[in-house]
Amino acid sequence: MSGFSIDWLDLREGADNRARDDELLGQARHWLGTDMTPASEKIVVDLGSGTGSTLRAFSAGPVSSTEQGSLNWRLVDQDAALLAEANCRHGDSQQLKTFEIDLTNIAALPLEGANLITASALFDLVSADFIDRLVSELQNKCQQQPVGFYAALNYDGRTSWTPAHSLDEAVLDAFNRDQKRDKGFGQALGPDACAYMERKFKGAGFKVLAANSHWELDGSDGDMVSALISGISEAVAHDSALDPAALEGWIQFRKAHSATGTCTVGHIDLLALPNSD
Ligand SMILES: C[S@@+](CC[C@H](N)C(=O)[O-])C[C@H]1O[C@@H](n2cnc3c(N)ncnc32)[C@H](O)[C@@H]1O
């Protein structure tokens, strides 16, 4: 168990798909069809795959299979139940293998022969040390075969609501403090993850592209917004800067407006490709 339920991942997937930057997703797919990835069977390794949302995003849309070739997915997660669900949903229709591995064990990751590493909603959980080690591993792999990296939906610290409430800013500050708690990788980068990755991949000689992928939520996402409010309130419940009674008032107000208000949550997608020159 990882603490990420199938229900929550299903709830957020529609908003994730609307938010993903189409241009970057298209370029990640296109990378799999270039001379830099000549094999007819492309290997994609999805880190922290959950039930396979990145696989589904790559499979959807107007792309022809010849552009990206035939994809061989390796889904990596530490949560056996999520991997079992991924297998159940896609095992018959996709070439896919699942790997129950703790990502911090980078040496154990099935990166051999990989053309592209992907992830979604993962990198705000990780530490600077994890990114350093992963970038260095990918830089080494590129000596044998070029490997690209696509990480979508990295939380960037921005959240705004309508209608406004006087505690919004204090709750967001507390939430962003919680984002930096250790999530199993050492102190998490939280909202700083994307800028850190960008710097590290550029330093390692990759070409880096980034684009906003904000959730734009309204009443049609009411169930998800309700779950989001619960998640935020759990994350900030023990923050000493928030008065518990005031926080309870904020929760009640937000839930009362979940079907009529709006919520924007900032994310950034990042694509890092080895330079061809
Ligand atoms: C927010 S979920 C995103 C899941 C999926 N990528 C998606 O977008 O629906 C984060 C995922 O990372 C996995 N995860 C977190 N820490 C991990 C670790 N140390 N090793 C392996 N997987 C991990 C969780 O089990 C979960 O599936």
Image (tube, rainbow, N blue to C red):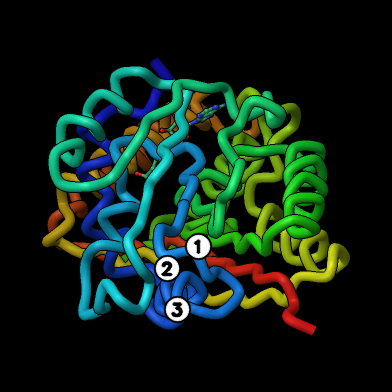
Estimate the x, y position of residue 204 in percent, counting from the top left. Answer: 85, 63
Q: Earlier in the sequence, mark 2 or mark 1?
A: 2
**Residue at 71%, 28% in the rendered image:** 107
Q: Secondary structure beneath disc 2?
A: loop
What residue type is disc 2 on?
A: His
Q: Earlier in the sequence, mark 2 or mark 3?
A: 3
- Residue at numbered disc 2: 214
User: Closest to the observer: 261 or 248?
Assistant: 261
User: Closest to the observer: 263 or 84?
Assistant: 84
- Give me the C-alpha separation between circle 2 and circle 1: 5 Å
- Residue at numbered disc 3: 30
Q: Are marks 1 and 3 in contact (CB under 8 Å)?
A: no
The yes-or-no answer for disc 3 within 8 Å of ligand 1 is: no
In the visual, does 78 lie left or right of 114? left
Q: Are marks 2 and 1 in contact (CB under 8 Å)?
A: yes
What residue type is disc 3 on?
A: His
In the visual, does 253 lie left or right of 107? left
The yes-or-no answer for disc 1 within 8 Å of ligand 1 is: no
- Give me the C-alpha separation between circle 2 and circle 3: 23 Å
Estimate the x, y position of residue 118 in percent, counting from the top left. Answer: 50, 53
Estimate the x, y position of residue 80 in percent, counting from the top left. Answer: 35, 18
Mark 2 or mark 3, whichever is nearer to me? 3
- Residue at numbered disc 1: 267
